[in-house]
Image: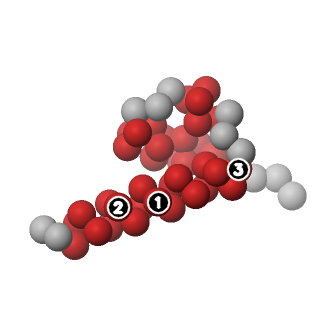
Amino acid sequence: MTYAAERIEEETAYLAYHFHWDMDSILDLEHADRRGYVQRVAALVERAEGER
């Protein structure tokens, strides 16, 4: 199964925005690691929004 290029672009943009990592560093991550970071950042963002 292939992972949609659009989804990879979304993940890359999301991590680049929040972590300020360059695209090559993000794309070098294993898929599971990248998804894990996306989930962790999303949880932090949701928690911060809930504290407002």
Residue 8 seen by the camera: yes
Question: Which residue shows up at 42% across the image and 56% down it?
Answer: 41
Disc 3 marks a residue whose amino acid type is His
User: Which disc, if any, is residue 44?
Assistant: 2
Cα–Cα gap, marks 1 and 3: 14 Å
Q: CA distance from mark 2 to mark 1?
A: 6 Å
Q: Position of residue 38 (x, y in %)?
A: 51, 55
Please tell me which of labels 3 and 2 falls first in the chain: 3
Determine which residue is flagged by label 3: 31
Residue 26: give x, y in percent of width and height.
58, 36
Residue 23 numbered mark, or none: none
From the viewer's perspective, is 27 left or right of 46?
right
Is residue 5 in view? no
Q: Looking at the picture, does residue 37 appear above or below residue 49? A: above
Name which residue type carries label 2. Answer: Leu
Q: Is residue 43 above or below residue 15?
A: below
Few, some or many residues within 10 Å of mark 2 (<14, 14–19, 20+):
few
Q: Nearer the viewer, residue 38 or 8?
A: 38
Question: Secondary structure beneath disc 3?
Answer: helix
Q: Are marks 2 and 1 in contact (CB under 8 Å)?
A: yes
User: Which quadrant of the figure contains the N terminus?
Assistant: bottom right
Dot placed on the residue nearer the N-terminal end, 1 or 3: 3
Query: Mark 1 sits on what residue?
Result: 40
Which amino acid, mark 1? Answer: Arg
How much space separates mark 3 and mark 2, taking CA atoms?
A: 20 Å
Q: In the image shown, does 7 or 22 lie closer to the viewer?
A: 22
